[in-house]
Image (cartoon, rainbow, N blue to C red):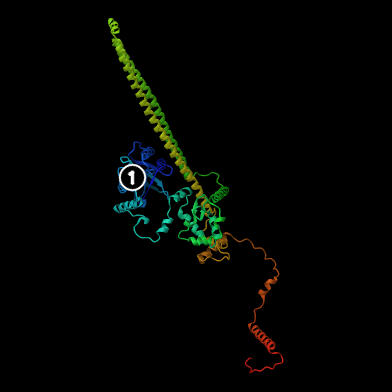
Amino acid sequence: MILKGNQRGGGQQMAAHLMNSFDNERVEIADVRGSVAQDLSGAFAEWAAEARGTRCRKYLYSLSLNPDQSQGHLTREQYLELLERTERRLKLVGQPRAVVFHEKRDEQGVLREHCHAVWSRIDTEKMKAVQIAHDRLKLRSVARDFARDHGLELPDGMKPGRNSNKFNNRAKQENHAERQQKERSGIPKEQRMADIATCWRETGSGAAFVQALEAKGYYLAHGDRRAYVVIDLHSEVHSLSRELIGVAKDKELKDRLAGYPLGKLPDVASAQAWAKKQRIEREKQIAEKQNQPEKQPSEIEKRLAALAGRQAARRAEIDMRRIELIARHLSERDGLKSMQDANNTGVISARLQKQPKGILVFLTRITGIQMITDARYRKQDERRAEQQKEQAVALQRRHDRELKETDRHYGALDRLEARENRAARTALHREEFQRIAELVRKPPGREINPEFDRVANPVLERTGTDDSRTPEDGSKQQKGKLVSLFSRFVEGLHPEPPREPDPAPLPVRTDFEKAVRPPIDLTEEFNREVENRRSREDRERDRDDGPARSFDPKDPKR
C-alpha cells in the first residue's frame, strides 16, 4: 500500500488527467461532495471560485492510493476506510471531496485498480485554507496502521528499520520528472542505468566509454546545472553522475573523462538536435531494411482508433443535449409568451364584461368614475407588464445559465480530448522509440547470447586500453567444453573462405639484423673486460710516474 499526496492548483488540468480514458481502461467517479456540479470539471471550478476569496493558490490536495495487487484487491469499504483515516490525520474531515477509481494495465498487461481522491483545502466558514504540514510522514503512518490492521505487507522502503544503503536506493527510484520521461520514451530508469553501467564497466578509457555510449544511443554533452549529461535518442536529458550512482564516483568519472573538457562538449540543445538527426537516420535505415508489404496495426493504434470512437460518441452526446436544450428553450419561451397573451386576453375579456351599459355609461362619464376606473386599469396593466417582463428575464437568465453550462462541458471535453490525444501521441512515439532502441541493442538477425558472441568474435571485444589488454575489472573468459563446442558450431555456420597463397618472403631489413645475432658468450666478455681494465691501469700508472721508473711491488702507493 503506497499513499502519495501533494498540494496543488490547476483544477481543470487535474480533471482532464483523472478523466483520461486512453491511459485508463476504466474511469469511475465514485463520489463528489461539497459542490453543485457532479462532474470533476464543474466541481473543481467551484472550489477554485471559493479559493479566489483567499490567498491560497494550491487549493487542492490530491492523493493517490496504489495497493499491492499481489496481496489481493481492496474492497470499496476498505478504500473508504483508508480515505477516512487520511482525512482525520490531515484534518480534512468535512471538506469537499471527489473520489475516482481507475483501472489500467501495468507493464505485464495485468489490470491494476487504484484510487484518486481530491479535497478542497478551503474552509468556507472561516475563508481560510486548511494547513497541512508533514503530510508525507502522516501518510506513511496511515499506511502502516492500515497494513497492520488488515494484515498487509508494506514495501521495503516503508518498513521500519535502518538501511545503510537507503540513499543510493532512493536515488535509484524514479521521481516525477523521470516518470514523465519514462512515459515519453518507454525506457525505465533501471534499464537505462544498467546500460550506462555496462558501458562503464566494459571500458577503461574515456574514448572507449563515449563510443560505447553512442553505440547504445546515448550522446555526451555538458548540462546547465550538471557537469556531464547524456542525451538519448528521444532527446531526453539524463545526469551522467546520477545514472552511475553506486557504480562510479564523481572523481572517477572526472578522471576518465579528462580528455573531454566541458568547454569542448556540445550543449544540450546541440546534442538533442544531433540525437534527433541520428534517430531519423536510423528510422530510415530500419524502414529500408524491413520489407513489410502489409503492416499489421499495433496495440496502441487499435487503442487510438477506439479512442477516436469514444471521443466522437461523447461529442455527439453533448451535441444532442445542446440541440435538445435549444429546442426546450424555444418551447419554454413560446409557452411563456402564449401564457402571457392568454392572461392579457382574459383580463381584457373580464373588463369588457364589467363595462357599464345604457344610462350608466353616461353617469360614470359625468361623475368621473370612468376616469378613475381607467387609471386603475392602467396601473394594473403596468404592474402586469412588469411581472411578465420579470418572468421573461428570469427565463432568459436560466436559459443563458444552461447554455453556459453546456459551453463549460464543451470546454472540459476539449481539454479532455487534448489530454487524451497527447497521451496517444506519446504512446505512439514511445512505441517507435522502443522499437528503434531495441534494434540498436539487438540488430535484426540471428540472436546470440553475449557469452557466445564474445567467443565467436574475440577481435571485436572492447578492452578499453591502448595496448589491447583486458581491463582490471573485466571478468576473464573461461574456456571449456561448451565454449569449444560452440566455436566449432560457429565455424560450421560461417566457414572460412579459401586462403590465398602466401606471398614471397621480403628481404630482412637492416634494423632487424641485431635481433638475429647469436647469444653473447659471458666468459669471453668477462675476460675482455679484465684485459681492458688492466690496460687502463697501466696507462694511468705510466702517466703519473713516467715510463723510466722501476716498479716496486712493496711500495704502499702501488
Residue 372 figure quarter: top left
- Residue 323 screen position, x and y as percent: 41, 29
Structural crowding at the residue carrying mark 1, measured as other residues with C-alpha within 10 Å and reported as few (<14), some (14–19) or many (≥20): some
Q: Circle 1 sits on which residue?
A: 130
**Position of the C terminus by quadrant:** bottom right
Q: Nearer the viewer, residue 92 or 311?
A: 92
Question: Please, is residue 241 above or below residue 385 in the view?
Answer: below
Q: Nearer the viewer, residue 251 or 19?
A: 251
* Picture residue at 49% right of the left edge, 47% below the top: 431
Q: Quadrant of residue 362?
A: top left
Q: Can residue 302 be seen by looking at this rendering?
A: no
Note whether residue 240 is visible. Answer: yes
- Residue 281's place in the image compared with 349, above or below, is below
Q: What SS does tag 1 mark?
A: loop
Residue 70 in picture, x, y percent from top left: 36, 52
- Give how far across and how far down residue 471 sits, in percent: 53, 65
Extreme-right residue of the structure: 548
